[in-house]
Amino acid sequence: MGKIRIKVLSCVIAGLGILLVCVSSALPGQLIIDSDEQFDFAQFYMEKGEYGRAISEFERFIYFFPKERRVSLARHLIGISYLKDGRYKNARRIFLRTVGDDPNSPFAGKALFLIGESYYEQGASDEAKYYFGQVLERYPSRQLKNAARYRLGWTRMQENRWREASEDFKKVGWASRLYDSAKYLSAESLKGELLPYKDPVYAGIMAGIIPGLGHVYVSRYKDAIVAFLLNGLFIWATIESFHQDHNVLGGILAFFEVGWYTGNIYSAVNVTHKWNRKVRDDFRKGFRDRLDLHLLTSKKGPAGLAVTFRF
């Protein structure tokens, strides 16, 4: 009996062993997520410019490690990724949450600055100026203040307010890495008041006197030839129709000529505004924006918004 029991017990143990092996082989492989590796993985995508994937990985980091010391940094980097990806509303939602949750946190001032930056990149000057002004009022960091003053100068130049831009650039502190660039821009931005603009009213008057002449004023010679020939032919055809007593035809041609003649004047005024806009844009493009946003992070925790030069 003893031998039978031993054999039965051995069979049971062997069966359990086989069962465990089968079960373990049937279970899928489990991936253990390490916080450092997950954070680095998200940063890897951010540095590659794959901001959508970076956002997903940072969100995964926050989900699996909600009490990790870098959660605030991860959320901040999500906002930066949205900003770099041109998803400005999403970026502002993240940054506003940062400022609202803890206005005294190390990220709050940077978040406020970046809200202004998002508006600046969209060309929304009024909103950008408001948030850069808030940075100057609420946060003592010299680095942030100098960055805000520098960006305010560029915002004024977006609005063609050259003298105010010059004054903003002058306020950048001498110890800032942006000082040399700001000093140069302070002097050069004043030249915006001396740009060779054309007068739209004068262009309209010239086009009214001789069709096409307003286009010649802004060097649009092909448009000038088309306007001159088109209006000339309609005027000639209208006059000939009336001379030959084709009054109905003359009236129709006169009606269309009024439209062409008015369009010629409107076009001359419009292309002159475009000329002036191009002059301003080309002037601004001649300057280099030396402010860049570069986030310095490490596994030990510190993170900062570093103002660097953009070449």
Image (cartoon, rainbow, N blue to C red):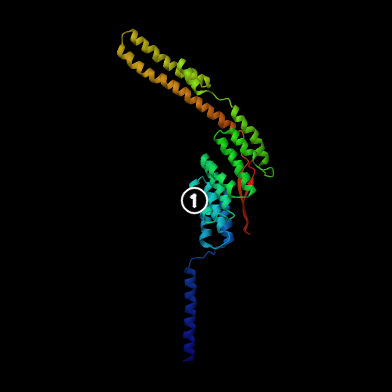
- The relative height of residue 296 versus residue 167 in the rendered view (above or below) is below
Give the residue number, with chain letter if any, for mark 1: 93
Quadrant of the snapshot with the C terminus: top right
Is residue 87 at all visible to an observer of this figure?
Answer: no
Kind of residue at badge 1: Arg
Residue extending farthest to the right is 175
Between 163 and 17, the one lying in front of the other is 163
Give residue 124's position: percent from left, percent from top: 51, 40
Label tally: 1
Give residue 290's position: percent from left, percent from top: 63, 41
Is residue 161 at all visible to an observer of this figure?
Answer: yes
Residue at 49 percent of width and 74 percent of height? 20
Residue at 39 percent of width and 13 percent of height? 235
Residue extending farthest to the bottom is 1
Badge 1 element: helix
Give residue 242's position: percent from left, percent from top: 33, 10
- The relative height of residue 278 versus residue 211 in the rendered view (above or below) is below
Label 1 CA crowd tier, 10 Å (few <14, some 14–19, many 20+): few
Residue at 55 percent of width and 58 percent of height? 71
- The relative height of residue 138 versus residue 194 in the rendered view (above or below) is below
Residue at 50 percent of width and 24 percent of height? 272
